[in-house]
Amino acid sequence: MTKPSRLILFFWAVASAFLSLHLWQQARALDVWATSRRWQSAVALGAFVTAVLLVVWYRALRANLPRLDVLRSVARRTRWGGALWAGVYPFALFLLARHPVYGTYFADIPSRLALLWMGAALGVVWLQAGWPRQSLGGMLAGVLAYQAAAYALAWYLPASTYPLSLGWSETSRYYYASLFFSPRLYGFRAPWPALHPSRYLLQSVPFLFHAPLWAHRTWQNFLWILSSLLSGWAVTRRLRLDSRWTRWTFFWGAVLFLLQAPVYYHLAVMVILVVWGVDVRRPKRTLAVVLAASLWAGISRVNWFPVPAMLAALLYLLEIPQDETPWWRYLAQPALWGVLGVSAALLSQAVYAALSGNPPQDFGTSFTSDLL
């Protein structure tokens, strides 16, 4: 067994010991340790696994173990099983966390992190046996990034059928989305939403099909997932990373980073358009992309009006060196994008305001609110 593999095995044993200790503390806190066979069995199983891992790790330090070599040979022949394990494991962990009975054993974040690490470590050792040319550290980073992002994405998959609001302003958001179809739904033409129109425009798609509430929730979850995946893909594609595994790791790391907030899907549209479509060496194409994204910004948020041009300018500064070009000429093109982009956003907002049926002053409340 190689030194990195032994190191992963050691940390796997540490994670197993931590999980066992945490389960024992949780059982004592719930006052079920003396009476619950399930809690006792869970702690005993964790302790047994920890002991086995420590024995194997200790013996691997002293000499190569023939049985481990046999296991490595089997893993090499079944390497696609390792890929399947690494791919499916975060969703299995998600189902475990949601289980009404067994999920209570792993209700807090530390225990789930320990389980995530143990599953990732097994997948990495299995994969590394099948693809030995890949570095173990890089493979571990890639598997952990994927499994953490996939686990976070999995929480968007279930669609609740609960008839009342699941959170703050959920029902009002569906109502605002319905206003685009008010003649068919309510029998009269109601004003379109004045706040965040692009978000409600995206959310309005299920109203085309008379969809039930769970379909609206599913569609919104799909928008969260798709916007995060496309944003991560656009940035990864832009960087032109050499190694396929590096691209994989960066992509899932970017998705995980975006899911921390997460970034609103109607705002991610502008990021995706600019990062994917801008070619700073083709000014006409870049200007067209900036204008398209700015038109979308005009029906999104007022503080995002300059963002498409700012993103394009950032890409320009990163990818085009100044060299001997005078600074005023070097910055002239990004400045032009800024002026035209903000103008396009203002025009888009003005056209939408005229069509929406709302008083024009409703679109300037961000600058006139007494709470500012």
Image: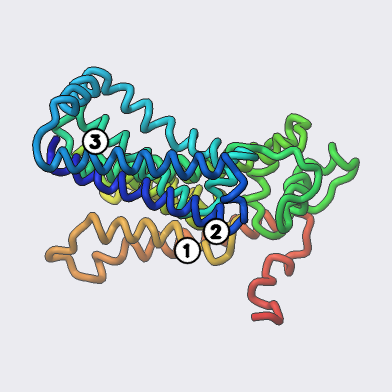
Q: CA distance from mark 3 to mark 1?
A: 34 Å
Residue at 27 percent of width and 36 percent of height: 124
> Which residue corresponds to mark 2?
345
Q: Position of residue 303 (x, y in %)?
A: 54, 66
Q: Quadrant of the N terminus?
A: top left
Of the residues shown, which amino acid type is indicated by label 3?
Arg
Of the residues shown, which amino acid type is indicated by label 2?
Ala
Foreground pick, 81 / 193: 81
Please tell me how crowded label 3 is: few (under 14), some (14-19), or many (20+) other residues with Cα within 10 Å.
few
Residue 289 visible to an observer of this rendering: no
Viewer-side label of 1, 2:
1
Question: In the picture provided, is 43 more to the left or to the right than 178?
Answer: left
Please tell me how crowded label 2 is: few (under 14), some (14-19), or many (20+) other residues with Cα within 10 Å.
many
Tag 2's secondary structure? helix
Of the residues shown, which amino acid type is indicated by label 1?
Pro
Tag 3's secondary structure? helix
Badge number at residue 244: 3
Question: In the picture provided, is 124 more to the left or to the right than 16?
Answer: left
Badge number at residue 306: 1
Mark 1 touches mark 2? (CB < 8 Å): yes
Residue at 54 percent of width and 38 percent of height: 96
Residue at 50 percent of width and 39 percent of height: 41
Foreground pick, 347 / 52: 52
Question: In the picture provided, is 351 more to the left or to the right than 242?
Answer: right
Foreground pick, 91 / 2: 2
